[in-house]
Amino acid sequence: MAITFHESSVPAETIGTGVQRQRLLTKQRVATTRILLDRLTLGAGAGIALNVAAGGLGWFQMLGGSAELDSGGTRQPLHDHHVAFLPPGYHGRLATSSGATLLYAEVPDAHSLDPNFASNPTPFRLIDWSREPLLDSMNDARKRIYLATPKLFGNKAIKGEMIIYPPGTNGANHHHVGADHFMYFTAGSGTAYANEVPFRVKKGDIVYFPDLERHFLRSDDDAEMVFVEFFAPGQYETIWVEGKACTWGPTGRDIRGGAPVREIKLHSGKGEIPVDV
C-alpha cells in the first residue's frame, strides 16, 4: 500500500549553523526505497556542503528563496525554478544570504540501476525547469515538464518530472513495472488512489508508491494541483488499466508562455524514454 505523510510530521534536526534537515524518505520509513529524500532549510547566511559518494547520484530542487552553488570555484545563482543534478563523487557547497528551502535527494546505488553507468560518466547539470518544454496530455487536461531524463542527466538510473493538474482534472489508473517512485506536492490539493483506495493529498505531502501498485489522482475543483515525481530506476514499463497509454504532445512553449530551451516530439508515456526527452 502507498505510504503517505506530510512534511510537517517529520521532525527537523540541526545539522549545521542555520541549517535544518527533515529526513522524508529513509530506509527506516520505506525499507525498499532506492531514493533517499531530505527537506533542507537554510537560514540567512547559512551554508552546507553537498557531497555525493562514488557510485551514487544526487540532485536537489529549490522550493523557495535563493542561494549560490559553488562547484569547484564556479558559482551558480539559484532560485525557486532551478534543479541541480550532482554526479558521482561531486563536492560542492550551497550558501544563501537570505534563506532557502530545497528538496535534496540521493540514489546511493545508482550504479546498479543503469548498466552503462560506469562507462558513461554523468555530468553536473543545472536546469531552469521554467524554461523546459511544456507538454500537454492528449488524454486529459494534465501538463508535464521533464526534470531528470537521460538527455538532461546522462543516465537511466532515475527519471523525474513535474505534473500539473488544472482544477477538477482526473488522471488515468495505471501501475509501473520495474520501478518505485515518490511524489512531492508543491501546490494545491486533491485525492490520490492506491489500488482504488482514496486518500487526500495537499501541498507538502509525500506519497511513495511501490512497484506494481495501481494509482491515479484527481485535483480539487478550486485550485491547480502540482507535484514532482521521481522514479528509480528511470527505465520501466507503465501499464494502463484501460489499456490505452497516455500520449504527451509538445505545446511549443514553456510554463511562462515563451519559447522553450529545446523541443520534444510527441511520444507515449509507457516508460520508454525517447532520445529527445
Image (cartoon, helix red, strand yellow):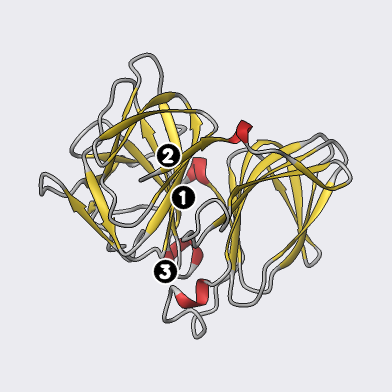
Indicate whether 261 appears above or below 70. above
Dividing the picture into quadrants, the one containing residue 8 is top right
Circle 3: element type: loop
Neighbour tally class for label 2: few under 14, some 14-19, many 20 plus, Cα within 10 Å: many
Which image quarter is the C terminus in?
Answer: bottom left
| Depth check, front residue: 87 or 181 | 181
Q: Is residue 94 left or right of residue 227?
A: right
Instruction: Identify the mark at residue 254; answer none if there is no mark.
Output: 2
Give the residue at x 44% y 81%.
116
Q: Earlier in the sequence, mark 3 or mark 1?
A: 3
Identify the residue under disc 1: 261
Of the residues shown, which amino acid type is indicated by label 1? Val
* Coordinates of residue 177 in the picture (x, y in percent): 27, 61
* Coordinates of residue 167 in the picture (x, y in percent): 34, 20
Q: Are marks 2 and 1 in contact (CB under 8 Å)?
A: yes
Q: Is residue 216 left or right of residue 240?
A: right
Q: Can you tell which of label 3 and label 1 is closer to the viewer?
A: 3
Give the residue at x 41% y 81%.
115
Give how far apart the Cα atoms at labels 3 and 1 are: 22 Å
Of the residues shown, which amino acid type is indicated by label 3? Lys
